[in-house]
Amino acid sequence: MVKKFGFIGAGNMAEALMKGILNSGEASPSEIIASEVVPARREYVTKALEISVVPDNAVVAREANVIILAVKPNIVAAVLDELKSMLTSDHLVISIAAGVKISFIESHLNWGVRVVRVMPNQPCLVGASASGFALGKSARKEDQELVQRLLDSVGVAFPLEEKLLDAVTGLSGSGPAYVYMMIEALADGGVLCGLPRDVATKLAAQTVFGSAKTVLDTKMHPAPLKDMVASPAGTTIEGMKVLEDGCLRGTVIRAVEAAAKKSAELGKS
């Protein structure tokens, strides 16, 4: 084996992880190989990251000992069946295929192949992912440490029991869509009050970004931070009353719960 990392699939999420690996110094371009069926995508990733990108999954399995499975969930079984004879206990398989359980992955591999299942989210594309991951039966402590480093290179990550990954899906997996809706709504409100659309959108996005950064940097609970903005008889508390009348918090909680339940259902099918 001559490569540290092999990617089966070179889509957007895979590209983001590759960039994280390269930027963190975990591997050099010469130590990464990927397979990709779309010729134009192969050409792009090869030029953008200066790594080896091939059309054959088997080449990746033969050359790398850490395999990142970055394909659509519906073809995971076919890909694993293709590579089963090449993967041994010397291999670590990291799956980012949404909803595909560790037991399913392990059932398509030889005993002893180490498996880690990861639930990343879309902001991985800009190095701001919020991920959860779970270890398979044969995974080792050093595998957990490696996955932690990889995911930390594109955001933050937490090791969890696999049964909690559905909750991660409902919260951080689906959550960006909820936040985009909030940004859009804030911007629409600004436009209603007379702001130009481009200014309103940038103000809304920066407001969400700044608020999130404040929670992360101060490590304070969101409630007292909210209270600091809402002065007595002021503008903020007036707006908050409208949000409470519309059951904002309860609606968001139910959205996370609904997405988590849907993830669990998909995992059974």
Image: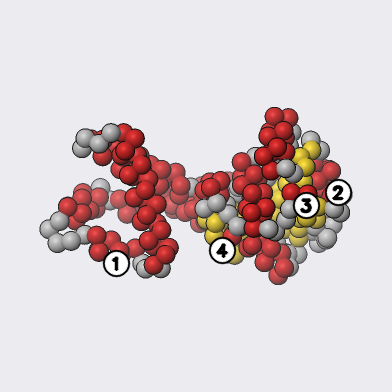
Q: Nearer the viewer, residue 64 or 58?
A: 64
Q: Residue at x 67, y 39 (%)?
A: 48
- Which callout, 1 or 2, points at the residue further toward the start of the chain? 2
Dot placed on the residue nearer the N-terminal end, 1 or 4:
4
Secondary element at tag 3: helix
The disc at residue 259 is: none
Residue sitting at x 73%, y 53% = 28
How far is mark 1 from mark 4, CA to CA? 25 Å
Name the outermost residue toward the bottom: 141
Please say whether residue 35 is visible from this viewpoint: no
* Residue type, mark 3 in image: Glu
Marked residue nearer the N-terminal end (3 or 1) = 3
| Proximity of marks 2 and 4: CB atoms separated by less than 8 Å | no
Callouts 1 and 2 close, C-beta under 8 Å? no
Q: Which residue is mark 2?
A: 62
Q: Nearer the viewer, residue 20 or 180?
A: 20
Which residue in the structure is indicated by mark 1?
A: 224
Instruction: Report which residue position mark 3 lands on.
Output: 31
SS under mark 1: helix
Instruction: Quote the CA–CA distance across marks 1 and 2.
Output: 54 Å
Q: Report crowding for label 2: few under 14, some 14 to 19, many 20 or more residues within 10 A (C-alpha).
A: some
What's under tag 2, amino acid-wise?
Answer: Arg
Sort mark 1 into few (<14), some (14-19) or many (20+) by Cα contacts within 10 Å: few
Residue 65 pos. (x, y %)? 80, 55
Residue drawn at 46 percent across, 47 percent down: 176
Q: Which residue is mark 4?
A: 158
Instruction: Identify which residue is drawn at 12% across, 58% down.
Output: 233
Count of numbered marks = 4
| In front: label 3 or label 1 | 3
Label 4 neighbour load within 10 Å: few <14, some 14-19, many 20+: some
SS under mark 2: helix
